[in-house]
Amino acid sequence: MKLGFIGLGAMGLPLAGHLLKAGHALAVWSRRPEASASLLAAGARGYASPAEVARHAEIVFTMVTGSEDVAAVVLGEEGLIRGGRSGNGQFSTLVDMSTIAPEMARQIATRLGELGIRMLDAPVSGGVTAAANATLSIMVGGPAETLAQVRPLFDLLGKTIVHVGENGAGQVAKACNQMVMVAAIQACAEAMHLAAASAVDPLKVQLALLGGAAGSRVLEVFGVRMVNRDFAAGVEARLHHKDFGILLNEAHRLACPLPIAALVGQQLNALMGHGWGRDDSASLLRVAEVGSARQ
Amino acid sequence: MQIGFIGLGLMGCPMALHLARAGHSLHLWARRPASLEPFKEVDAHTHASAAEVAKHAEIVITMVADGPDVVQVCLGEGGLSEGAADKSGLIIVDMSTIAPAVARDIGAKLAAEGIEFLDAPVSGGEAGAKAATLTIMVGGKAAAFEKIKPLFDKMGKSSTLIGDCGAGQVAKACNQILTGVGVAAVAEAFNFARKSGVDPARVREALLGGFAYSKILENHGQRMLDRNFKPGFKAWMHQKDLRIVMEEAHKLGLMLPGAAATAQMFNAMVGSGLGEEDSIAMLKLLERMSGSE
């Protein structure tokens, strides 16, 4: 198939690679030329704008940072819609794998729908490792028939693909995912901090807990990073901070109280204030330590 | 003076009337014609758009619900800046509560068109607006503030120039942190007292003499005891104001755990149908959530 991919960062690049390796023609555009160099060497074709990508691809994937980035890439001056059906392109389906506000996803879907272009919001969970291993969880919002068409491509990228509901539903699921996950990272940080403050070896505590009812993926992955004080990003904390901005805005919009998420959001704010946004979210341990006799 | 006024709601209506009674000519535009009723007896001219208001006024005051409304009125189609295109010296004074960043943005855009802008949000609620006892927190240029001060004096008992454009809104955000968290604290204390089998009225009386004294304990506390939940200041407005606060904190990388918890309580109030009641219905929410009704 003729595919397009925009957003060749830590997550997007391996995903685009999987699609290319499976034998699909891949049209790419990237803001920074060096981001696409390896893909071009492997046979992808580079274009000068998202609109150009849309003229050469049926299904375009986007994997960028925020709501504004998706809006710019899709609806902007040189955006995908300029090369869409009205622009003599082949572009018929957008698959946005970025994490953005559900409301923004719905708006983009509506706008594209007016032009006869379908959209799936398909944010992912699993991080860089799962992207590299094609084992992502993909949470999909949008029409079932569009998903049926795209599913063989999702199978190249992830192992759990769930159709959550209409457009926006994928982003709602992702917001829930982030809420549960980062609250767990915070709980993990507090546990490791309590252990250390009590002069007990956090590693031993972590090992003991992993075998019991408090065992979790987060305790396993982020617990080790905290024990080793390895704060180099896996997931850059600034991205979790961004996601909490989205979900706390949704909480306000829906008048839906999220007391724990709100407090975790404040810990992330403090993390950003310390300038640790490009470090791993395991840095929530460092935030806890700042307000403590034991640093 | 020829004064434009846009936003004739619970707050704006009495504020505009004070200016009319002080001898100023009003130029009005309102989305709902009913808002204009109270101005039949005073020197007031009705116009078809905000732009028309700007053509006829030296100073325009806006008092609307939220940032996007202010942007629309100031910069939108048929807005104030459109009407001010062929004149100089217009001053726009926005007394709404909006995000500091939005105020700064509006100020910069208006300045580029030669229009002065003050952000001048208020504290004191509907009662303060009616009694002309508002507290007015102002951001913008000192010269413009001096020009407007006599008008502020007709609407409030104090007006303070806090700093540059946006600074008034920052002060208002601080005010909303203190009042929001304060109302929640008083509601929690009363609910705690009652559930412990102690009369909250006696607790209040005792506390008023000590370090826990506050206007919120005194005034809002009394209304909680009277179970008088009529607004006043509606819970959904406090919810909106705390959203502004929390968005700023997010942008600044600043931790506000107390305000964050309180903002969620306001979400719960609005979500469970208490949005149109006064903020002090926080007490009802706490009673419901802890099963102590």
Image (cartoon, coloured by chain):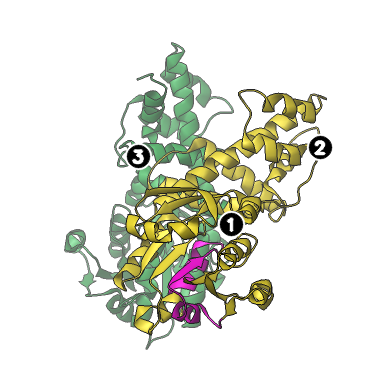
Looking at the rendered structure, the secondary structure element under dot 3 is helix
On the picture, is A240 further left or further right than A99? right
Q: Kindly identify the residue that appears in the image at 57 percent across and 41 percent down.
A: A181
- Label 2: how many Cα within 10 Å (few below 14, some 14–19, many 20+): few
In this rendering, do the residues under marks 3 and 2 share a single chain? no
- Position of residue A157 measured from the top left corner of the image (x, y, whole percent): 55, 56
**Residue underneath mark 3:** B271
Extent of the magenta region: A47-76
User: Residue visible at 69% across and 25% down?
Assistant: A209
Residue holding disc 1: B251
**Residue B242 visible in rendering:** no
Colour yellow belongs to chain: A
Asked if residue B291 is positioned above or below residue B70 in the image, the reply reads above
**Chain B color in figure:** green
Please give the name of the residue rendered at 72% of the width and 24% of the height, measured from the top-left corner. Answer: A208
- Find numbered disc 2 in the image and state the secondary structure of the residue it sits on: loop
> The residue tagged with tag 1: helix, strand or loop?
helix
